[in-house]
Amino acid sequence: MSRSASARGLTFLLLCLAASAPARADNILVGPGGQPASFVDAARLAKDGDTIDVLPGEYRGEVVVFEQKKLTIRGLGKRPVFLGSGKNAVGKALWVIRDGDFTVENIEFRGARAIDANGAGLRFEKGRLKVLRSAFFDNENGILTSNASDAELEIVDSEFGNAPKVVGGLHHLLYVGRIAKLTVTGSRFHSGFEGHLIKSRARETKLSYNMINDGPSGRASYEVDLPNGGVATLIGNIIGQGAHTENPVVVSYGAEGRAWDRNVLVMAHNTLLNDGWFPAWFLRVFRDRLPEDTEVHAVNNLTVGAGVFALGASGQFEGNYPALRDMLVDADTFGFDIDGWSRLRGRGVDPTRFAGQDLSPRAEFDMPVGTRPLPPLKSWNPGAIQQR
């Protein structure tokens, strides 16, 4: 073989190797006012696997549809704020994620509006989305998903609040369609208006160590609505209904009938609050709209204020206790642990072998958002707070 032929062969081999090598992931830096780059331009130019780093500041009307398959978007330093300012992407949201594996971290979404009154801070249509340390305020929906049966949404250490005060609007802070899985951990939901704080139609819903408490200014209906059943696990949450609620039900399961073959509701170590004078329905299970084999398991939950818990929700119930508000340390300042003198301390049953699984709490909600881990326990209090 001639030397020139060998050189051509080597060149061809190097070109093939270069073409087959994975593209290098880039970090794209954006700032308010388009300096050093605008967010819209960054979203258009970003390749799969890239990270868009967002500098602190306000981003008005920078609405985007993401078509990438894999992307990370993270705020740097003080949380950047994205404001609708009268705009939305394709009539849906400030950001629309079409189909991919996305991470959104340390971003705030405000003022999402749409013509159909269903505007969202984030519209998640398909794939996997993880939301970390982010916030959603004054949106018609904080996050709204599609009904893609294989989609998964995970929310960690985030805050949702201040639903628009539109009579008849029924705006939800979080509205999840018939996706595969919703997981929410260490997050806070408050200040709803007529709509629900959390509404999930997912096949599997897991809410762990959250503060889902409407608060004194809230006028939400249900605090947690699971209208189509599914496998739902609520553990270690503080779930509170305000005095001005639009509906006495706090946790609703199956109100719109079944959508999934398996229907199991598990509630362990939740503190359920009623701040109003009228009795609350702390847990309502719509048995007449669900299959006969629907399972309900409730262990070591604490209900605070007037109301009923197990009425009409037949199943396995153990270690659940009612309490008065003055039996807590100070609910007005988020002291939801049982007072040291109360006879309820240590009265919980062993949750490690309940309903064929270990339902013992591993953490507690930690204000303003997040969790703090719990050490192994030898005895358990009813409710979400074990130690102080």
Image: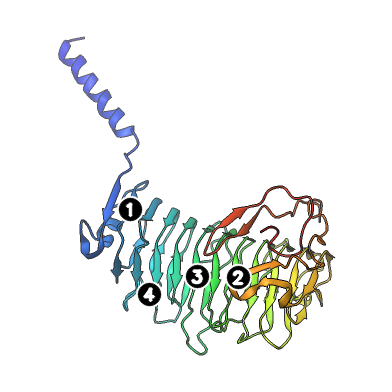
Q: Nearer the viewer, residue 372 or 163?
A: 372
**Rendered image: mark on residue 144:** none
**Rendered image: mark on residue 334:** 2
Q: Is residue 244 left or right of residue 74?
A: right
| Image height of 120 relative to 75, above or below | below
Q: Classify 10 Å Cα crowding around label 2: few (below 14), some (14-19), many (20 and above).
A: few
**Residues at marks 2 and 3 touching, judged by CB atoms closer than 8 Å:** no
Q: Which residue is mark 1?
A: 52
**Residues at marks 4 and 2 touching, judged by CB atoms closer than 8 Å:** no
Quarter of the image for the C terminus: give it: bottom right
What is the spatial separation of the Cα atoms under label 1 and label 4, in whole angstroms?
A: 24 Å
- What amino acid is found at the position of numbered circle 1 in the picture? Ile
Q: Position of residue 326 (x, y in %)?
A: 72, 77
Q: Classify 10 Å Cα crowding around label 3: few (below 14), some (14-19), many (20 and above).
A: many
Q: Position of residue 49 (x, y in %)?
A: 37, 46
Q: Which residue is mark 4?
A: 91
Q: Which residue is mark 3?
A: 160
- What amino acid is found at the position of numbered circle 3 in the picture? Phe
Residue at position x 63%, y 72% from top? 224
Quarter of the image for the N terminus: give it: top left
In the image, farthest residue toward the top: 1
**Residues at marks 3 and 1 touching, judged by CB atoms closer than 8 Å:** no
